[in-house]
Image (tube, grey):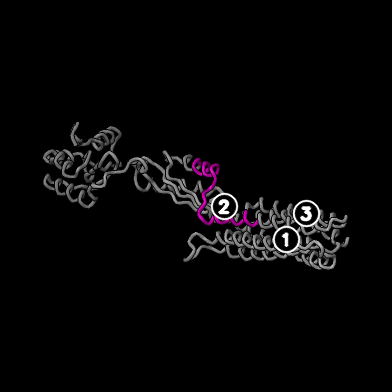
């Protein structure tokens, strides 16, 4: 069954293709009208807006290319997928808009430096400017609605790009009106304003994309949501060292969860997988890495000089062998308070357990504990429970199975 992120990604790419093709068709028509009519009507502002529409066309093709590649599945070179292609595309769009905006400012500046050569503007320029204004505003509303529905940062950026086009077209229309009224310098001034708006929008897109490429984290509200999902998982006592980073329109989450230090490895793994699935259910998350901790390792860590399992098992078996016994299993708990060792003897019937008791009494468990540098050492007898025993017999043997021979750390001494 596909994950929430996969389903959302597929829908996002479908919407991106559809809305981008609509934008391409509209910008192609408008660009042709703006440049052709702008040249014949002697409107620099309209020509500048036409060049802006040409930049929109280029950006639309960039969006299509990024949309195609960002949907590719993870591979050997991109283990987390290709979602950052969209972020790179946004960075490219930002750089493109800055270059176009600076070019418009330069051209408008040279025209203003020679006011005498500014020709009169024809009425047709105003008609085209109004048509472009209405078209771009309609395109913006359509693209923003679709982009917000699928939560695509790249598509939202492209939608606001269309809104900047509408705003620039409004400025162009006002400049043309002023020029038609006899103030000819308003047309190049309008062109300069359009150039500034385009450059500023490019800077905004580029800076945001650069921050995401630098592993920007989720905002505080989204991070709090991730922490709440982890804490709501049964078995999770606390969450620490949680980190997030953007991956295109999604995020990667890393977190340490605190569990009971005495549970089994398999139970700890089960709790971690449960926590991970809860986080992945959030459609903002692409993947999550959950680390299980018996204690908050940001505050307390086990001593680094504790013996390894191999040495402990060897010494335990050697000590028990002297008393004629052997360990069935050895459970170790490495905690900040020290090492706890739990030795389980092989399961046997009650008569065998009574027979082995004197042998165990001859094992110096306190000396073994000190040799291992353990805080606590426990030895307990495991018993098989026969299916045909009555309740009283079963209860008696359960009581014997929980009996322990303890060698605890002496008070006030390590």
Pick the front one: 28 or 330: 28
Count of numbered labels shown in the rendering: 3
Q: Quadrant of residue 39?
A: bottom right
Front position among marks 1 and 2: 1
Residue 372 drawn at (x, y percent): 19, 45
Residue 269 drawn at (x, y percent): 40, 48
Pick the front one: 117 or 13: 117
Task: Read off the residue under disc 2.
Answer: 4
Q: Quadrant of residue 257?
A: top left
Quote the CA–CA distance across marks 1 and 2.
52 Å
Residue 213 is inside the magenta segment: yes
Q: Quadrant of residue 182?
A: bottom right
Residue 8 is inside the magenta segment: no
Q: Earlier in the sequence, mark 1 or mark 2?
A: 2
Q: Main secondary structure of the magenta part?
A: helix
Q: Secondary structure at mark 2?
A: helix
Residue 167 drawn at (x, y percent): 75, 53
Residues in magenta?
201-228
Quadrant including the C terminus: top left
Task: Read off the residue under disc 3.
Answer: 171
């Amino acid at each position: 069954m596909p994950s929430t992120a996969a389903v959302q990604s597929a829908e996002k790419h479908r919407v991106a293709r559809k809305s981008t093709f609509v934008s391409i068709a509209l910008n192609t028509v408008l660009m042709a009208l703006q440049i052709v009519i702008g040249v014949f009507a002697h409107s620099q502002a309209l020509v500048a807006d036409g060049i802006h529409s040409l930049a929109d066309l280029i950006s639309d093709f960039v969006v299509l290319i990024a949309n195609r590649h960002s949907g590719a599945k993870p591979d050997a070179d991109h283990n987390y997928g290709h979602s950052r292609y969209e972020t790179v595309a946004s960075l490219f769009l930002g750089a493109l808009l800055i270059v176009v905006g600076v070019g418009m400012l330069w051209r408008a500046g040279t025209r203003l430096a020679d006011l005498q050569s500014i020709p009169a503007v024809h009425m047709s320029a105003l008609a085209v400017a109004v048509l472009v204004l209405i078209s771009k505003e309609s395109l913006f509303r359509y693209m923003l609605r679709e982009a917000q529905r699928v939560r695509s940062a790249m598509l939202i950026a492209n939608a606001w790009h269309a809104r900047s086009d509408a705003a620039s077209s409004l400025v162009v229309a006002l400049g043309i009106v002023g020029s038609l009224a006899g103030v000819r310098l308003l047309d190049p001034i309008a062109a300069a304003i359009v150039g500034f708006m385009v450059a500023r929008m490019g800077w905004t897109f580029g800076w945001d994309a650069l921050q995401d490429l630098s592993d920007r984290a989720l905002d505080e509200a989204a991070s709090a949501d991730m922490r709440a999902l982890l804490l709501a998982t049964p078995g999770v006592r606390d969450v620490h060292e949680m980190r997030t980073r953007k991956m295109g329109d999604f995020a990667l989450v890393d977190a340490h969860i605190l569990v009971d230090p005495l549970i089994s490895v398999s139970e700890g793994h089960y709790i971690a997988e449960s926590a991970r699935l809860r986080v992945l259910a959030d459609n903002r998350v692409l993947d999550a890495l959950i680390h299980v901790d018996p204690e908050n390792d940001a505050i307390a860590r086990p001593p680094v000089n504790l013996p390894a399992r191999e040495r402990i098992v060897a010494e335990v078996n050697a000590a028990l062998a002297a008393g004629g016994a052997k360990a069935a299993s050895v459970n170790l708990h490495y905690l900040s308070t020290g090492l706890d060792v739990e030795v389980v003897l092989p399961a046997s019937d009650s008569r065998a357990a009574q027979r082995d008791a004197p042998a165990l009494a001859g094992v110096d468990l306190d000396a073994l504990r000190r040799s291992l540098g353990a805080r606590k050492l426990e030895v307990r007898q495991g018993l098989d429970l026969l299916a045909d025993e009555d309740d009283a017999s079963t209860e008696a043997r359960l009581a014997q199975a929980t009996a322990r021979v303890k060698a605890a750390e002496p008070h006030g001494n390590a």
